[in-house]
Amino acid sequence: MQLNPSLAFNGTAEEALALYRKALGGEVQVMRFAETPVAEQVCDDFKNKVIYGTLISPLGTIAAMDCPPERGGQPGKNFSIAVHVDSASQADSVFTTLAAEGEITMPLDKTFFSERFGMLTDKFGVSWMINYAKN
């Protein structure tokens, strides 16, 4: 299992990743909405925004994405802890435990990028993303 911070922005994810790379070193990788199966579902001015980006630095990995204003990106509330697990059963267990008395924002399910992915806010108000991607 691995934990990584994941940051949500309102259209400035690529700029933020460039700043963090300058400060921390490493390599930035970016996938844009236009490169995914959901490209048809986003407005034209959002197609070139970041659906998933990472800074892989000597200090660790930071993920970043652009979100429509109604989905997040508010400064101070624009982060989640991403948990990358080793199996579907581990994803189920971690998700179920963290969701107890919390709020599920995206049920754990198969997506175009992952075998199991889900989002929730735990009972303490902390936002989590659980991901199991078979390699």
Image (spheres, rainbow, N blue to C red):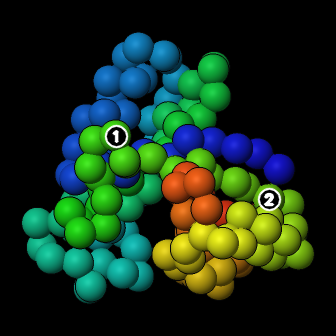
Tell me the tag on residue 85.
2
Horizontal arrangement in the rendering, residue 91 relative to residue 89 (left or right) = left
- Local secondary structure at mark 2: loop
Quarter residue 112 falls in? bottom right
Indicate the amino acid at tag 1: Gly
Indicate the amino acid at tag 2: Val
Residue under the point 23% across and 78% down: 42
Is 19 rendered above or below residue 84? above
| Residue lying furthest left | 45
Tell me the tag on residue 13.
none
Residue under the point 44% across and 56% down: 52
Residue under the point 37% across and 34% down: 17
Disc 1 and disc 2 in contact, CB within 8 angstroms: no
Q: Position of residue 36 (x, y in %)?
A: 40, 74
Q: Nearer the viewer, residue 14 or 109?
A: 109
Is 81 rendered above or below residue 45? above
Is 127 rendered above or below residue 45? above
Tell me the tag on residue 76.
1
Q: Position of residue 41 (x, y in %)?
A: 27, 85
Cα–Cα gap, marks 1 and 2: 26 Å
Q: Nearer the viewer, residue 22 or 81?
A: 81
Horizontal arrangement in the rendering, residue 53 relative to residue 98 (left or right) = left
Q: Position of residue 107 (x, y in %)?
A: 59, 82
Horizontal arrangement in the rendering, residue 52 relative to residue 40 (left or right) = right
Q: How many marks?
A: 2
- Local secondary structure at mark 1: loop
Does label 1 or label 2 sit earlier along the sequence?
1
Q: Name the quadrant of the C terminus.
A: bottom right
